[in-house]
Amino acid sequence: MKKNLVLFALFIFPIVAYLFFATGVNKFMFLPTVTPNVPDLGHWHSLSGEPVTLNKKITILGFTGNNILYNKGNYFNLNQKIYLKNQAFKDFQFVMIAPEGTQDEVKKVLKGLSDLSDESKWLFVFAPENEIQVFYDKLKLKGKLDSHYGTKNVFIIDKKRSLRGRKDKDEYKEGYDASSPSDLYNEMTDDVKVILAEYRLALKRNNADRQI
């Protein structure tokens, strides 16, 4: 009996484990592109007055709407489930597009986030509501902004400014529900890992090519 267990541990289990993980890698190695060529943020500015860009950044993009404090729980969900796990990645950022006039509400949200973590990669940019709508329409999504020019969904934008999301049968998952901790934990966490792994692999390849 012991001999059979030893043989299983040495030979059979590693093969089963390999097949299991190989299946997972094939399924999640690449996150499909939902919308290519997402426009950059143009002349919009952050609280500090500095411009913010999506270029060469892995961005979690959101639209706050003008009822920011009402939805503040969404930002704390994102902070705990996504931001804290990935903030050390150099080119990772959160960008929340907010209507002009909501600066005071944003300051209160940032104050709450700063009590939990380094909030330096939480970037809020401000724009007129009509410009926010025009920008959102260019994402070419099925979901719409609500009457406050916001949405509870957030989106993954890669370094080439493509919106990425998983594909379930014939439909893309366009965004992730920030009001749902389970959606963030069960799906978005994995998909962010895929994007980060994709760029780590590309970096290793580039370094290897330079050494040849």
Image (cartoon, helix red, strand yellow):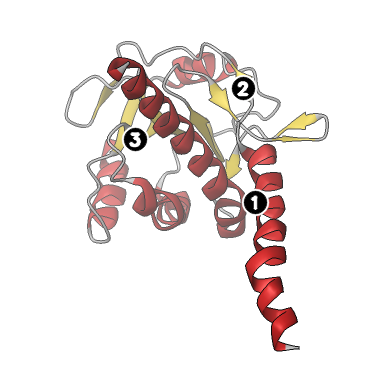
Mark 3 vs 2, N-terminal side: 2
Q: What whole-number distance in Å separates the C-alpha atoms at marks 2 and 1?
A: 24 Å
Using the image as rendered, state which of residue 204 and residue 158 is in the foreground: 204
**Residue 159 position in % (x across, y down):** 41, 22
**Residue 137 position in % (x across, y down):** 59, 16
**Residue drawn at (72%, 59%) of the image:** 16
Badge 1, how many Cα within 10 Å: few under 14, some, many 20+?
Answer: few
> Which label sits in the foreground, 3 or 1?
1
Q: What whole-number distance in Å separates the C-alpha atoms at marks 3 and 2?
A: 19 Å
Badge 3 amino acid: Gln
Q: What whole-number distance in Å separates the C-alpha atoms at marks 3 and 1?
A: 29 Å
- Residue 159, above or below 145: above
Place residue 210 in its image quadrant: top left
Tag 2 secondary structure: strand
> Which label sits in the foreground, 3 or 2?
2
**Residue 66 position in % (x across, y down):** 44, 37
Q: Residue at label 3?
A: 93
**Residue drawn at (38%, 53%) of the image:** 85
**Residue drawn at (46%, 18%) of the image:** 161
Res. 21 mark: 1
**Residue 148 position in % (x across, y down):** 52, 34
Tag 3 secondary structure: strand
Quadrant holding the N terminus: bottom right
Are circles 2 and 1 on residues that touch, CB within 8 Å? no
Q: Residue at label 2?
A: 33
Quadrant holding the C terminus: top left
